[in-house]
Structure formats: C-alpha cells, structure tokens
Image (cartoon, helix red, strand yellow):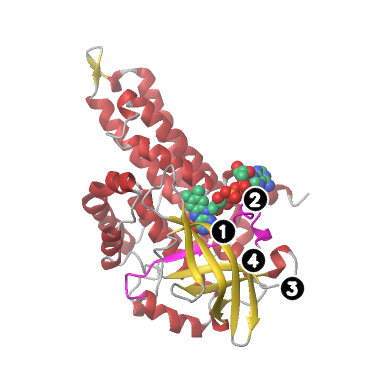
C-alpha cells in the first residue's frame, strides 16, 4: 500500500486534474509537431510543478522522492514528453539541495523559484554513452573560472533549459576520478546548441547537442569538490531514475491499460464486446499484473529513499524499478496496440504513441542492460 500524506494527496489530485484538463488535449499535437510545449511549461510553472523540490521559503514544498514519483506518474499517464521537463528540472534542483553549498543554494534557489525556469542533466557525449566514465569534454581552471571545451549529445530539454548540470573532465585522474560537476547557465559565451534529434517517441521533449568552445564558467559553480563529480552522479543522479524513467514508464503503462480497457468494452466483433473474449481478458490480466508490480516496486523504493536507507541498499532497488517498469511499459503498450487491432496501429488512437514513448524510456536514464549490470554487481560484487 502506498501511504501518502494529506499534502501529497492534494498534490496528486491537482496534478491529475491538470493532466486531464490541460495536458491530455494537447498530447497528440505535441507528438505530431514535435515542438516544445511552452504553454504546458507555463501551466506547470504557475502550479508549482517546476519548483517542487525547493524549500517552502522559496515557493516549493520540499518534495521528497515519493512526491516526485507521484507527480511524474500522473502527468505521464497522458504525456511522458511533458512530464520529462518536471523530471529534469527537479533533478538538478535536487542535486543542488543535496550536494550544493549554502552559498550556491542562496545564489540559485531564488532564480529557480521564479517558476518558469527549466533545467537539464548533461552527461552523454558522442563517444561516451553507457560508458559515462569515458567522457572527454574538458574544463580547465584559468583564474576565477573553468574553460569548457567539448560536445554533449542527447540532452533532454536541451536548448529550452535555463540551467544545466554538466559533467566534465577536470583531471588529473583517469576515468571516474577526473570528473567534476558544474551548474552552467544558458547564455554563457562559448556555450551553444547543435543538432536536435528527430526521435521515434517522446516527441515534443527536445533532445539536443550542446557545444562548448572556450566557454567560461565561474569556479563557484562547481558542485561538490573538483574531481568528485562521479560521486555527485552516482549518489544523487542514479537515484533520480526512480522519479525519472521508472515513474515515466509507470504512467505510460497505466495510460495504455486504461485506454485499452475502455476500447475493449466498446468494440464489438462477433456480436460481442471484444472484452468478453478470454484471450483479451488474459492480456488485460497480464498487463495489470505488470503495472501493479511496477507500481509496488517504485513506491517501495521511493519510501526507502525518503527514509534515508543506505545508498548501497537503495541503488540496486532503483535500477530494478527502472528496468522492470520500462520493460513492463513496453509490453503493456505493445499489447494495448494489439487489443486495438488495426486502429491501434494508427495515429488516430494514442496507444501507438505510448508504445513509441515506452521504447525511449528503456534507453534513457541508463539503458536496461546497464541497470542489470548495477543489479548483478550489487548481488555478486565486482568480479
Ligand atoms: C530520449 C533520450 C533522452 C536522453 N536524455 C539524456 C539527457 O538528458 N542527458 C544525458 O546525459 N543523456 C541523455 N540521453 C542519452 C542516454 O543516456 C544514452 O543514450 C544511454 O546512456 C545509452 O548510451 P548510447 O546511446 O551511447 O548507447 P551505447 O552506450 O553505445 O550502447 C549501445 C547498446 O550497447 C549496450 N551496452 C553498452 N555497454 C554495455 C555493457 N557494459 N553491458 C551490456 N550492454 C551494454 C547498451 O545497453 C545499448 O543497448 C538520452 C537518450 C535518449 C534516447
């Protein structure tokens, strides 16, 4: 059972209403046009969804992992592409909350609290995806600033963000040892945007290339110590998958299941609703088992994070939730398309979009192969 506080129930109700009234009617168009939905970003900002993690004095609600999971789940039932902007923005603020200095919090919190600021999480490079420790973008200390050079790729909310949490190599030290994390602002001279990906799904959530050519970033924007960026990435970044890919795909699965149930009750073949055929009923039973199992795993894990259980216990649970839920969403959405038959395969119905979106979530936030590496390493140790 998921135990929500009164405040969490109120937030859930509010987000459910917003998703139904404001996001759902736009979801197909956002996918079709593949344009960032600034109108939805404004609505999210006005309703406090872009600064949930901030302390109350800055307009937030000090949101914990469970609150974030619930918000992302609700929006993703109708549009994971819209939910992603909440995910990336809250993730950066969360890293700052947990790993930033008091000076950084005082400097950045008021700017996040203006409600319309978006953030991005910047790790991947053209030659460093799953093997994140091999990133090559460099930052060299020169006086009061670090000089950035290199290219990042596949960055969600790429060019539409205002603040970027960027992992770069400051050296010395090989692989993970030489990595540092920085907050970089849009508009920094030498920081520009390149190619925008044309994706199969999650359309409307821009995925862009970031280019750094002698971009100067104040040294006060370093998060944690120089050379300790890997700790920032694993200790805070890896856990965000629970309200990221895991909750996004839970929402996708729930949305697809609900839509297919409604359709199967209405669609008549052989003189009966297709929902009366056992073959369809058993597909629904399987879809519901996967979805409910995913939900239990996610909220059990978010509760562990909120109780402050040790990282070594929580990290593999987050990976299990990410891997299981995204695989579940892929299966549930594929079955939803099957249940709608030929109509499910057309853009007149939302389930083909949900299936395309589900595929993306199996890849991003660390592929499911990498999640299995994390899980098995926790079980077996490093062999
Ligand atoms: C929609 C979308 C949004 C994204 N958003 C962001 C973002 O905001 N910020 C960001 O930094 N990145 C982002 N990414 C990048 C994403 O994190 C990477 O695509 C992902 O980590 C995989 O890296 P890769 O694409 O280079 O694949 P590769 O690492 O080249 O992997 C290719 C295949 O090999 C498998 N593989 C690789 N290594 C192993 C191994 N050791 N064992 C078993 N299998 C392995 C992978 O699982 C995969 O199937 C996004 C990607 C997508 C698709």
Residue bearing mark 1: 238
Q: Residue furthest right?
A: 383
Q: Residue at x 56, y 71 (%)?
A: 213
What kind of element bears circle 2? Answer: helix
Mark found first going from the N terminus, 4 or 2? 4
Q: Nearer the viewer, mark 4 or mark 3?
A: 3
First in residue order: circle 1 vs circle 4: 4
Residue found at the very far top of the displayed protein = 270
Whether tag 1 and tag 2 are in contact, CB under 8 A, the answer is yes
Contact, mark 3 vs mark 1 (Cβ under 8 Å): no
Can you see residue 365?
no
| Residue at mark 2 | 374
Disc 1 element: helix
Report how far apart the C-alphas of labels 3 and 1 lie in the structure: 24 Å
Q: Earlier in the sequence, mark 1 or mark 2?
A: 1
**Residue 202 at what x, y percent from top left?**
40, 47
Q: Is residue 208 magenta?
A: no
Disc 4: residue Cβ within 8 A of ligand 1's nearest atom:
no
Question: In the image, which is nearer the foreground, mark 2 or mark 3?
Answer: 3
User: Within 10 Å of the Cα at label 3, are there few (<14), some (14-19), or many (20+) other Cα atoms?
Assistant: few
**Which residue shows up at 64% across the image and 48% down it?**
375
Q: Which mark is on residue 172? A: 3
Write the start and end of the magenta stretch as one range.
Answer: 113-135
Query: Which residue in the structure is indicated by mark 4?
Result: 230
Left or right, 232 with reference to 69: right
Q: Residue at x 55, y 79 (%)?
A: 216
Residue 361 in view of the camera: yes
């Amino acid at each position: 059972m998921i135990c929500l506080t009164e405040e969490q129930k109120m937030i859930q109700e509010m987000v459910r209403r917003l998703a139904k009234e404001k996001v759902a009617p736009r979801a197909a168009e956002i996918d079709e046009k593949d344009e960032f939905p600034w109108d939805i970003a404004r609505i999210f900002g006005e309703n406090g969804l872009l600064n949930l993690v901030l302390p109350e004095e800055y307009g937030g609600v000090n949101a914990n992992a469970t609150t974030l999971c619930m918000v992302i789940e609700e929006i993703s039932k109708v549009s994971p592409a819209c939910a992603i902007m909440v995910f990336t923005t809250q993730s950066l603020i969360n890293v700052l909350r947990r790993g930033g200095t008091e000076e950084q919090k005082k400097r950045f919190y008021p700017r996040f609290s203006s409600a319309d600021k978006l953030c991005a999480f910047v790790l991947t490079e053209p030659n460093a995806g799953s093997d994140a420790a091999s990133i090559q973008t460099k930052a060299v200390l020169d006086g009061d600033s670090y000089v950035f050079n290199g290219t990042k790729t596949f960055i969600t909310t790429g060019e539409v963000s205002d603040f970027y949490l960027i992992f770069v190599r400051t050296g010395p030290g090989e692989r993970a040892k030489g990595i540092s994390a920085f907050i970089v602002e849009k508009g920094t001279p030498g920081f520009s945007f390149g190619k925008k990906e044309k994706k199969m799904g999650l359309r409307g959530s821009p995925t862009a290339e970031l280019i750094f050519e002698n971009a100067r970033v104040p040294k006060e924007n370093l998060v944690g110590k120089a050379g300790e960026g890997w700790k920032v990435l694993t200790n805070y970044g890896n856990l965000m998958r629970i309200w990221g890919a895991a909750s996004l795909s839970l929402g996708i699965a729930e949305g697809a299941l609900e839509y297919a149930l409604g359709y199967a009750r209405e669609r008549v073949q052989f003189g009966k609703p297709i929902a009366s055929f056992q073959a369809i009923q058993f597909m629904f039973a399987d879809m519901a088992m996967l979805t409910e199992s995913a939900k239990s795993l996610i909220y059990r894990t978010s509760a562990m994070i909120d109780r402050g259980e040790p990282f070594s216990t929580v990290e593999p649970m987050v990976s299990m939730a990410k891997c299981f839920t995204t695989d579940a969403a892929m299966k549930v959405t594929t079955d939803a398309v099957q249940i709608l038959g030929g109509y499910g395969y057309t853009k007149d119905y939302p389930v083909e979009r949900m299936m395309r979106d589900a595929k993306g979530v199996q890849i991003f936030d660390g592929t499911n192969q990498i999640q299995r590496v994390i899980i098995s390493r926790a079980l077996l140790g490093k062999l």
